[in-house]
Every structure is written in structure tokens, then in C-alpha cells.
Amino acid sequence: MKRFTAMLLILTMAIVFAACSNNVENDAATEDAADDDTVILRLGHIQSENDLWHEGSLKFKEEVESLSDGKMTVEIYPNSSLGGDRDMVEGMQSGTVDFALVAGVLGNFSPSIQLLELPYLFADEEEYRTVIHGEIGEEIIDRVLEDSDVRILEFWDRGPRHVTANKPIETLDDIKGLKIRLPEIKAMEATWKEMGASPTTMAWDEVYTALDQNVIEAQENPIPFIYGGAIHEVQDYLSLTAHKYEYVTLAMSDLTWNKLTEEQQEIISEAAKIATDYENELVAEQTEELLQEMENEGLTVVEPDIDEFAEAARDAHEEVAKTIDIDLYNRILEELK
């Protein structure tokens, strides 16, 4: 009898121990499930970790994670590691990319935004901001969303685009036949052809090598972008052509947006605004410093008279606009008046 009682006691203790173990495992499983509820989002861009784009991306990541108390996190993929601009737009359309820093390539998916890519459309930064932050800018955002399922959260300033080459670009004659790299943007390509250049479209991650090997002779970009891509290592001259006042969009997959709760969407919107202010301040503060640093490293800066450049470029505008949206183009001109 004593032996039976002892065995019963041992069996009872084993059952209790097993039940406790199951409770511990269930608690751990619940904790794991809570961890799995963390929303992980991917942001890609084509620039290096040295570029201001990356700094802005880090700020966006910081704000998203802070505002969500760590329940949302952003993984950043620089250096075209999620592909080039077109690849990332297509990734946002399919939902494999959540955010990307992209600009004029969106015009291949929604034509209207290409009007912003016309060289010398804007005489200065104030004109550029009047359009993109006004009713026309909002309309373009809506069209991009409708046409491509890509949601533009914010426009980031980049400063004016300038030309680098291994010769000074001072007159329109210096552009004749110039083998200049351009992004895959038809409006830019048509205008540079009108100015006399021989443009080649090329992915950004190929540009440094192509310049170094003399496959192309020149490229054009804002000063922070030129510095971030170390273009001054393979080009001798920077001509301050200021042919386009530049932006990049912080864009988001609409598929991803629609999967988020309203609270999460508000967090994304707020983080995007904070990161935009941060990025724009960096561009304003550091552009002159980066230019001076490149000059110190041997880059020669040229200040051409850009009036003849602008006149030649504008000769192409109307014909290009007819292939995009002539009515919207005329409304932009009216706005600028």
C-alpha cells in the first residue's frame, strides 16, 4: 500500500511538472508571437552610405521606430542593393519593396511627373517649390498613385543639378556632341539633345566606372550627389549650370500602406515629415561645404553664363510637353507667371 501511495505521489508530481512546463512554453510562444507582430519595412536607395540620402533614411528609420515604440522597424538598403530606380519602383508595385528614394524615373510609370524634369523649366528654387508644394504638385502626387500604385509621401530637396566633365562647360558649343550620362528620363534626354549633347541613359551604379574608363565624358547631378558618388575623383571640372532644381521623393508602396493600421499610417506620415525637414536642412547646410571640399581635392569650378543654355533647352519644352500633358505644362507656366 505504501509503495502504491508513493507511486501515485510521483505520478501526480510528474503531471503537475508537465503542466507547469507547458504553461512556460505557452508563455514563451505568446512572447514570440508578440515579437512576430513587429512590422519590418524595407527602404532602398541608389546612393552610398556617405550621401545625405542615407542620412535622411536613417532619420526616417529612427522616427518610425521611436514613434511606434519599436513595433515598426525600417531596414535600409543603400548602394542599389534592392536594384536601380526602375527596379525599386517595380518592387513597390509588387510589394517586395516598401519605400524607395526615387525621382524622375517615376515618369516611366506616370507621365505627368516628367514635366518636373525639364531642364530650365524653373528659373530658381523658389519657382520649383511654388509648383511642387502647390496644387499642381498635389495633382501630380495623385496621378502617380493612380497610375503606378506608388504613394509619394514627401519631396526631399536636393539643390540644383550641375554638369561635371573633363573639360570646362562654359558655352553651348562646349555641349555639342558631349557624351553625357543621364538618368532614364525621356524629358531630360530630349532637352539635352536639343541643346546639342549626345546623351546616354545609364544606371547610377555604373557611372563612376564609365567615367573612369571614358565610356562617357560627363554627368549631371546636385552637388551632394556628386560628392556622395565620388565623381570628383574621375572628373576635373564642375560647371554650375543649375539646369534643374532637384527633388527626390520618399515614396511608398501603396500595397504596403494599405496593409497598415490607421495608427501605423499616421506614424509613417509623421516620420516622413520629420525626416524631410532634417534632410532639407542637411542639404542647405552642407552643399557649400561639400563643394569646397571637392575644390580642395582638385575639382575646378566653372561659372558659365547659363542664359544661352536655358534658351536652347526651352526650345524643346513644348514639343516634349505635347507627348506628356500639354495642358498641365501650360498650367505650370501660368503658375510661374
Image (cartoon, rainbow, N blue to C red):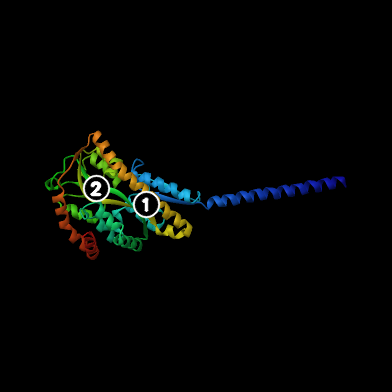
Mark 1 = which residue? 100
**Amino acid at circle 2:** Arg
Work out which residue is located at the far left of the displayed protein and give it: 173
Few, some or many residues within 10 Å of mark 2 (<14, 14–19, 20+):
many
The circle drawn on residue 161 is 2
> Residue farthest to the right?
1
Which amino acid does the dot numbered 1 rest on? Answer: Ala
Number of residues whose C-alpha sits closer than 10 Å to that of mark 1, classed few (under 14), some (14–19) or many (20 or more): many
Is residue 85 visible from the viewing direction of this image?
yes
**Left or right: 8 with respect to 261?**
right
What element does badge 2 sit on?
Answer: strand
Q: Position of residue 165 (x, y in %)?
A: 20, 42
Evaluate whether residue 230 shows in this view. Answer: no
Would you say 164 lies left or right of 44 here?
A: left
Element carrying mark 1? strand
Q: 330 or 22, which lies in front?
A: 330
Task: Please indicate whether residue 244 sits to the left or right of residue 43 in the image.
Answer: left
Q: Give the residue drawn at x 17%, y 56%.
A: 314
Where is residue 186 shown, x and y percent of the image?
Answer: 23, 56
Q: Quadrant of residue 54?
A: top left
Residue at image position (22%, 59%) is 336
Instruction: Give the label, 2 or 1, closer to the camera.
Output: 2
